[in-house]
Image: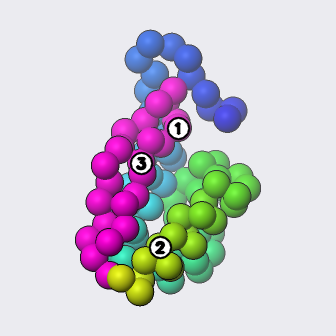
Amino acid sequence: MRAFDSRPDPVTPSWAAEFDAWAGEVLAGEKVDALRRLHRNRAPGARIALPTPEHFVPVIVAAGASSARPGPVKFPISGFAHGSFTRRSAQFG
């Protein structure tokens, strides 16, 4: 929230773009263990993008639950809002 930018054309910080790209790659590769294992220590930009885990834990649970019905992960919404807020949504199976 500290990086909220209300200007008309905000620039996405590199840490936000790097974390979003990492999350997309891990989700698309169905690497649930990579999500679960210390995402805060391994993912680029995670300490800034997710200072607390409550917004990321649901995607870990959803990815784990979807492993019983494997299928391609789709991202119907992507991009950024207000500079650093990812809009990525994941659709499993």
Against 29, residue 82 (above or below) is above
Q: Secondary structure at mark 2?
A: helix
Note whether residue 42 is visible.
no
Q: Quadrant of residue 27?
A: bottom left
x then y, percent, for residue 78: 35, 44
Against 31, residue 46 (above or below) is above
Which residue of the protein is positioned furthest toward the top in this rendering? Answer: 8
x then y, percent, for residue 45: 55, 53
Q: Quadrant of residue 68?
A: bottom left
Note whether residue 91 is visible.
yes
Q: Label 3: how many residues lie within 10 Å, few (<14), some (14-19) or many (20+)?
A: some
Q: Which amino acid, mark 2? A: Ala
* Residue depicted at 51% across the width and 70% down the height: 62
Q: Secondary structure at mark 3?
A: loop
Which residue of the protein is positioned furthest toward the bottom in this rendering? Answer: 68
Per the image, the residue denoted by label 3 is 88
Against 31, residue 18 (above or below) is above
* Residue depicted at 47% across the width and 42% down the height: 86
Against 22, residue 80 (above or below) is above
Front: mark 3 or 1: 3
- Residue 63 numbered tag: 2
Sequence-wise, the earlier of marks 3 and 2 is 2
Q: Which residues are magenta?
A: 70-93
